[in-house]
Amino acid sequence: MSADDVAGWGPLAEPYHSDKEIPPGSPPWRENVFLAFFDRERDVYGTSHFTGASNAGGRRARLSVVVGGTAAEIVEPMAAGEFGTPGVQLDLSGQVRAKSDDLVAELSFVPRLPPVDYSASNTLPGLDDTEPLRHYQGSGTFTGTVAVHGAAPVEVAGGCLRDRTWGWREENRHWLEYYACFLCFEDFDLTLMKFRLADGSTRAHGATVGGRAERVTGSRVARNGWGSVTRFDVELDGRPPIELAVAPPEARIWLPLGEPDGAQALTAYDEFVEARTPDGLTGFGIVEQGILRQLA
């Protein structure tokens, strides 16, 4: 990959696998890039999502932001084998540029801690267990400008989260429900995910990275009447569990996945939240939840 592993991002900057052989009749081969970013001082939160595919629909490039409680978004169909559209451009080294009548943004992302590799655990469910999805997550910082609905540009700076996924994947075939979180503390990151699948099984995995390095083996949550997570009990391999109290979300952004055909659709969203341990450690990041709607 070179170029200093594409600006230090390593596998998070992996290019699109345009040379992947896809025989006729193969399941969907999907390649995704996701970024979430937050500037709490200026009340700016956002996500950018590039959902690619070589042989399936549901391809889109997206930038969604909430600035001072006001939402703006660009969503455009994306060509097969590409990351980016005329309105939302991605440079894998860590640049996102977007322009429409309602939203203009130039954002730069820089890595913070080493990424977490979910691939070997096969936690993120794909369609072929003999070739599990490759999935990486990492944190960073970001700077740039954002302008919504004709307002003057706002200079922004803060934290960011990034992931990169590729493999045989179609969420609404076998994901019934899931939740995930990625939280940045002062000197470490905590990331975990948990899925309930159509075959009745449950998968959970995660890790801490940075100032502490542990394997997450399981988790439980509590929710409020709006469905938001209010508490995580995180199980660790050979260590005492981490208890996290989760504050009400500061912003929520919907996350379109796949290309529904009929009634069945996976509904997902990201909430930007603060989380605190009983001994006062404070982290910030996203909690993502999704559930499959099937009733016609």
Image (cartoon, rainbow, N blue to C red):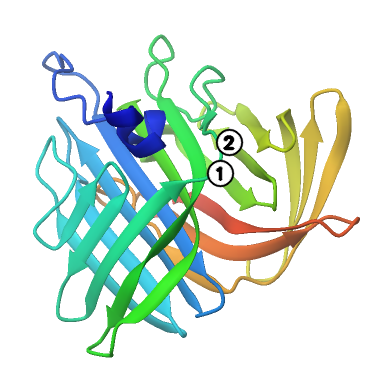
Of mark 1 and mark 2, the one earlier in the sequence is 1
> Can residue 257 be spotted in the picture?
yes
Residue 86 is situated, as x and y percent measured from the top left of the image, at: 8, 59
> Can residue 169 be spotted in the picture?
no
Q: Which residue is mark 2?
A: 196
Quadrant in the rendering for residue 213: top right
Q: Which residue is mark 1?
A: 178
Q: Residue at x 69, y 71 (%)?
A: 225
Three-letter amino acid code at the position of disc 1: Tyr
Q: Nearer the viewer, residue 259 or 136?
A: 136
Q: Is residue 174 above or below residue 293?
A: above
Three-letter amino acid code at the position of disc 2: Arg
Q: Nearer the viewer, residue 139 or 155?
A: 155
Q: Residue at x 34, y 49 (%)?
A: 257
Q: Residue at x 22, y 74 (%)?
A: 104
Q: Residues within 10 Å of mark 2 (few under 14, many from 20)?
A: some
Q: Is residue 225 above or below residue 119?
A: below
